[in-house]
Amino acid sequence: MAGNPNQPIVILKDNVERVPGHEALRSNIMAAKVLGATVRTTLGPRGMDKMLVAKGSDDIVITNDGATILHQLAVEHPGAKLVVEVAETQDNECGDGTTTAVVLIGSLMEQAEKLVEAGVHPSIIAKGYNLGMEKALELLDSLAISVSHDDKPMMLKMAKTAMTGKSIENIMDDAANVVVDAVLLVADEVDGKMTVDESDILVKTKRAESMSAELGGVLIDKTRPDALMPKTIEGVRVAFLNGPLEITKTQTKAKIKINEAEMLSAFSEAERARLKAMADKFAAEKVNVVLCTKGIDDQVQYYLAEHGIYALEFVPEKDCSYAAKATGGQVITKPEDIYPGVIGTAGKLVMDEELEMTFLSECKNPKAVTILLKGSAQHLADELERAVEDAKRVVQDAVEDGSYTIGGGSVETELALRLREYAATVGGRVQLAIEAYAKAFEIIPTTLAENSGFDTVDKVIDLRQAHATGNKYAGLDVFTGKVVDMKKQGVVEPKRVKRQAIQSASETAMILIRVDDMMISKNAEQMAHGR
Ligand SMILES: Nc1ncnc2c1ncn2[C@@H]1O[C@H](COP(=O)(O)OP(=O)(O)O)[C@@H](O)[C@H]1O
Ligand SMILES: [Mg+2]
């Protein structure tokens, strides 16, 4: 071969840091364990809260919501990023179970670490985990119980299970009721399948003296700009305008040279007429409410008020289109486009001065509802909103899938037991990996016990025994420490939440286990700092 034999062969650019084989696996195990340990103290109704300082600001977030916590952590490690992605996917797909998913990955990686130390090759571990996952999902299906979408008591139980532990205990019953009513109201059967369109439910929070949760038609965080406008309207005919009700600068800049007082007054006369025409346009169509996403000229406001029309300016576009949907109207861009087909209708409009909100009730399309949450402090309002969002998604999951599983560590204990039985039928080194996979599930009851201040070893043994003697719904009552039938206790969760958590935690663990080389390209700045 020609050339200098001592010349190094450059395969990787010099800005790539290479982490070899076992180092990469160790580093990924560490990352997953750290994240699991970070969120696990929040798991369950008696989990603790975390106080976080939001990224890039001084805002303080107090929460025990796994997704929120991970979102706020600026995670850099590539393996850790994958774990954070699992939490995000879990949140997008199910709206609950994020802590469970992350804790499970941490546990799966911890068990894998023990096997590696015992000399089991990572590819064997990954194989066992894959077999374990397939079996676990199959077992989960057989453990799941069917529920009809209109079974309100069961939906309430699921909503409450999702909300327990958030610091909103005193209004949980109200909130759960409101959430279930809202979801059942907008649920629709499409091609023989129940579906819930999330955008049909708008959640609004407001600071108020006391905490509450209410169901309303449409609410908008605005009040009339002109005190001459009415405060209530019956038989609402509402127009939606995505554009200004004023004469924009470019329109007045027309090249007219005004040099005489007469011309000036004629000009302003013409302008006034144009502004009046805008208001008249709505009155001519018997519109009595105008929602405008941009500004409304003072003069137009005055003319609208003269017609007895209630108007709102600078309504967020999202609220405007939501209100249009709820009232069966359509958003137009200029007053000239109005015709009866775009006008929405509702029974009543009420302006609430204290809350500084406008309510539209008895809307034409009842399949659009707003949940109004009042919180006595901002962080309480925020946590209430997160709890309601979780519960809303959980009820949606259950309505759409029609199936649920039993919580309180019961599913995980049963899976661990059945997976161990399955492992014994496989044999060889893979058996060890499936047993490790089975053991990983016990992190959930262990953590529930730990977070509630009970002895973890005792509780897990009690649970194992209950399940071994056929009580497949036995779980841990985190308030009394007793092992009880969680189905009777009403601690229930949609199957989708468990299924997604098990599947994505297992798949991500397998990916992390199979990695035997990590190459991290540094950016220019990091190179300059010699990192
Ligand atoms: N009343 C209860 N008793 C025992 N366990 C409960 C109860 N309510 C919820 N859990 C359990 O708490 C876990 C969920 O905790 P949570 O903090 O909401 O985390 P995640 O982010 O995973 O949803 C589930 O395993 C669930 O079964
Ligand atoms: Mg939860």
Image: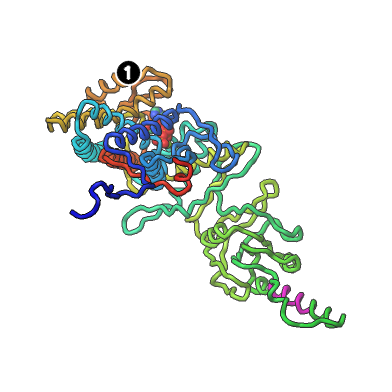
Ligand 2 picture quarter: top left
Does residue 458 appear anywhere in the picture?
yes
Is residue 53 or residue 351 the one in the foreground?
53
Q: Is residue 110 magenta?
A: no
Does residue 490 appear anywhere in the picture?
no
The residues colored magenta run 269-279
Relative vertical location of residue 162 with respect to residue 333 in this rendering, above or below: above
Q: What residue lies at 72% left-to-right and 73% top-to-bottom?
A: 275
Mark 1, ligand 1, within 8 Å: the answer is: no
Indicate the amino acid at tag 1: Val
Image quadrant in which the C terminus is located: top left
Please provide percent x and percent y for residue 116: 24, 29
Image quadrant in which the N terminus is located: bottom left
Left or right? Give the position of 319 relative to 246.
left
Left or right? Give the position of 97 relative to 278.
left
Q: What element carries label 1?
A: helix
Please provide percent x and percent y for residue 294: 64, 63
Circle 1 sits on which residue? Answer: 457
